[in-house]
Image (spheres, rainbow, N blue to C red):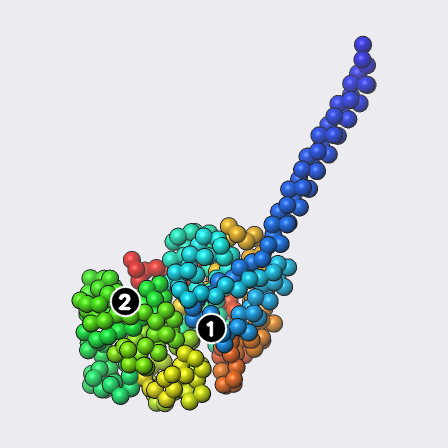
Amino acid sequence: MESKTSSMKRLVLVLGVCFAAVLALLFTTGCAQQAENKDPITMVWLPDNSSADMTQSREAIGEVIKNATGREVELMTTTDYNVAIEAISSGSAQMALLGAEGYVQANGKNAAVQAAFTNSDENGTLDGACYYSRICVPADQADEYKDGDGYSLDNIKGKKFSFVSATSTSGFKVPSSAIVSNFGLDSSDELLEDGPFFSSVMFGDSHQGSAVNLLSGQADAAAFDDVDVDMYLELVSGDANSIGATYKVKDDAEAPFDSVRGKEFTIIGVTPVLNAPFCYNTDELSEDECTKITEAFCSEEVASNPSIFADPDDERAKAIFEKDSDKTCFVQVDDAWYDPIRKLGA
């Protein structure tokens, strides 16, 4: 009959073998997860930031992501807002820089898409972290929209109008809300097709494209923002981003503005818009990776990088963001900060 001591030794041996097997399994699984995490991170860009002159800026941003995570980064440019929104929602892209409306739509498709950080105001805070949605007309036709000492949207009805995209915040959501409110329309759906409100509706597919639609004469009025086009422009009269301000395309403006150099437009409507968020698909990036990326972008090193934040006084500088002051930087945001944009569609 086997002694109790022998039985105990055998039990300990069996348990030891089992424990070793479990450790081996955990180690193998851990190695597999690490291998998966070495796959490239795909960062998707909206059409406005996909132009050739922004290549260096995109690459500088990709380098920050790479250094923060140790993973290679693939930069996915697009010519369609919906492609970018679908890419981050589906997980085929793990990061994106979307407009506020695009972010709200992506989050609605997949709650795993979460806002992470955005560019600050000139004080380094979120208090005035906004850009501007503008409704503009050719400068030589601006008198048609005069209303006393100011301007009115009343005469845009029946005109040929250019938006950016139906998923653009400042190129559709915000200006269409202003038009709906001004005319007491039932919804912005009336603005999406030729008639009953506009005689013709077109989409520029980027803010640059919508501005060129206006300046080339294809559209009588157009919506586009300031941050994506003002690098091609100079202020002729009035205060920047104010009703009545007139801008002129620079004589050496690059494509797509090279075909409309010297052309001028006047702002007849303007609305501040929450700055665009960088966002993550949190199903595709670990919490640790998200934290490291956010910390890297909110650092002084990134805030001082001229390829990411361009000096607005340097006409040759090309970057997706501008260094409005020494305090301009990236600041962390969350999903709730974009609730005002959600309410526009409520």
Crowding around mark 2 (Cα neighbors within 10 Å: few <14, some 14 to 19, many 20+) is some
Residue 136 in view (yes/no): no
Question: In the image, what residue type sits under mark 1?
Answer: Ser
Q: Is residue 10 left or right of residue 113?
A: right
Residue 89 versus residue 227 in the image, above or below: above
On residue 51, the disc is 1
What quarter of the picture does the N terminus occupy? top right
The reply to whether the C-beta atoms of the residues labelled 2 and 1 are less than 8 Å apart is no
Residue at image coords 53%, 72%? 55
Residue at (46, 70) in percent of width and height? 49
Asked whether the viewer can see residue 241, the reply is yes
Please name which of the two marks, 2 or 1, marks the residue nearer to the observer: 1
> What is the three-letter code of the residue carrying label 2?
Ser
199 and 9: which one is in front?
199
* Residue 291, above or below 310: above
**Residue 199, position as x, y percentages in the image:** 20, 72
- Separation of residues labelled 2 and 1 (CA atoms): 28 Å
SS class, disc 2 = helix
Q: Quadrant of residue 184?
A: bottom left
> Measured from the top left, where is residue 171 in percent x and y?
34, 70
Is label 1 in a helix, a strand or a loop?
Answer: loop
Q: Position of residue 92 (x, y in %)?
A: 49, 54
The residue carrying pointer 1 sits among few (fewer than 14), some (14 to 19) or many (20 or more) residues within 10 Å by Cα, namely: some
Give 104 or 94, whichever is nearer the viewer. Answer: 94
Q: Quadrant of residue 135?
A: bottom left
**In this view, 135 is above or below 77:** below
Which residue carries the number 2 mark? Answer: 177
Percent across and percent down for residue 180 are 23, 67
> Residue 298's quadrant in the figure?
bottom right
The answer to which of marks 2 and 1 sits earlier in the sequence is 1
